[in-house]
């Protein structure tokens, strides 16, 4: 009986390994290897949430908002995940940060760099912040929702009822609320976040900076649930749910992916403080200007 049990365990592990590799082989590669650099300590992953809706075709699809898909793409979420010494840190880069765009003669909001391709975005991050990027990962909204559903939903604490009529967020409960994929998508996309206080809907005055804090809170929960999940079938469902819209750099191997998964086991990433910025307005509209000297200690955490 013990021999039979041992054989079954080995077969299950082999099957899980082969299934995981088959999922990995479905992931689209992005040619950014020429822009990747090795950090002197740890590993930096540039993780981008794209607002492309090319796979969203009908009502009911995650990310559908009743309008036509935009002709271009912009990076809706930009963050650096830094792994080192059994610890993880997350740095969010505001999408409205006004910076020189790599490969051009001008400056724009940093999320516009992605419209010139992932390589331009990687170069823009590296050149403006002196952050080495080892690996590149990109996920669209559809896949994002699939990941959450694959995990069986995630729980976010709401101190007040919240809504955003543009993103589709509507939560009338307070306290811990379990969100499915579509609800989670509406939460992280919210740019006009409102809370019900004393009978009135009050919009978050911090705008994009508040959105970054909500995204960090959300991603901390997601990474924490991934790291705590021991059921290989649940992890497989999560991976399968997002594989179709995931893109990774052309140098990442299956072994690299396993190292990332293993490195995140039992880790809840530390969300670094928001980058210090000033509000401004120019030809690009409302923008954020980095307070460079004050930002250096924060940037040093992922260099």
Image: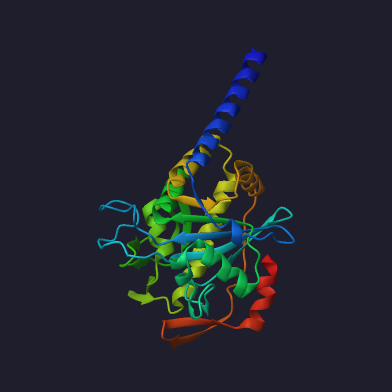
Splitting the image into 4 quarters, where does residue 93 fall? bottom right
Image position, residue 224 (x, y; %): 58, 52
**In the rendered image, the vertical position of residue 20 relative to residue 65, given as above or below:** above
Of residues 220 and 72, the one nearer the viewer is 72
| Residue 148 horizontal side relative to residue 167, left or right | right
Q: Give the residue at x 53% y 63%.
A: 119
Q: Is residue 174 visible?
A: no
The quarter of the image holding the C terminus is: bottom right
The quarter of the image holding the N terminus is: top right
Image position, residue 197 (x, y; %): 38, 74
The colour scheme used to paint the residues is rainbow
| Residue 220 horizontal side relative to residue 198, left or right | right
Q: Give the residue at x 57% y 68%.
A: 123
**In the rendered image, the vertical position of residue 63 relative to residue 163, given as above or below:** above
| Residue 154 horizontal side relative to residue 37, left or right | left
Splitting the image into 4 quarters, where does residue 230 fall? top right
Of residues 206 and 157, the one nearer the viewer is 206
Q: Give the residue at x 46% y 48%.
A: 147
**Residue with the most extreme top position:** 1
Of residues 171 and 66, the one nearer the viewer is 66
Image position, residue 257 (x, y; %): 60, 45
Image position, residue 87 (x, y; %): 69, 56
Q: Is residue 257 visible?
A: yes
Q: Give the residue at x 59% y 23%.
A: 11
The total number of labels drawn is 0
């Amino acid at each position: 009986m013990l021999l039979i049990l041992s054989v079954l365990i080995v077969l299950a592990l082999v099957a899980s390994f082969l299934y995981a590799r088959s999922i990995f082989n479905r992931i689209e590669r992005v040619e950014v290897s020429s822009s990747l650099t090795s950090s002197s300590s740890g590993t930096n992953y540039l993780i981008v949430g794209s607002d492309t809706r090319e796979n969203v075709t009908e009502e009911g699809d995650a990310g559908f908002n009743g309008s036509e898909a935009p002709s271009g793409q912009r990076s809706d979420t930009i963050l650096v995940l830094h792994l080192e010494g059994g610890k993880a840190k997350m740095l969010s880069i505001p999408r409205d940060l006004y910076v020189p765009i790599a490969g051009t003669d001008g400056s724009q909001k940093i999320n516009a760099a992605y419209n010139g391709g992932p390589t331009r975005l990687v170069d823009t991050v590296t050149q403006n912040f002196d952050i080495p990027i080892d690996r590149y990962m990109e996920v669209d909204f559809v896949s994002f929702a699939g990941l959450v559903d694959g995990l069986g939903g995630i729980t976010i604490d709401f101190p007040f009822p919240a809504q955003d009529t543009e993103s589709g967020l509507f939560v009338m409960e307070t306290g811990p609320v379990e969100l499915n994929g579509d609800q989670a998508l509406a939460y992280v996309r919210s740019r006009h976040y409102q809370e019900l206080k004393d009978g009135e809907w009050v919009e978050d005055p911090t705008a994009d900076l508040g959105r970054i804090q909500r995204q960090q809170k959300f991603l901390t929960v997601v990474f924490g649930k991934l790291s705590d999940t021991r059921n290989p079938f649940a992890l497989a469902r999560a991976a399968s749910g997002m594989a179709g819209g995931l893109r990774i750099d052309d140098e990442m191997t299956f072994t690299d992916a396993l190292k990332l998964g293993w490195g995140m086991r039992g880790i809840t990433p530390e969300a670094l403080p928001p980058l210090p910025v000033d509000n401004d307005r120019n030809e690009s509209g409302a923008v954020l200007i980095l307070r460079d000297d004050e930002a250096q200690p924060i940037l040093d955490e992922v260099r």
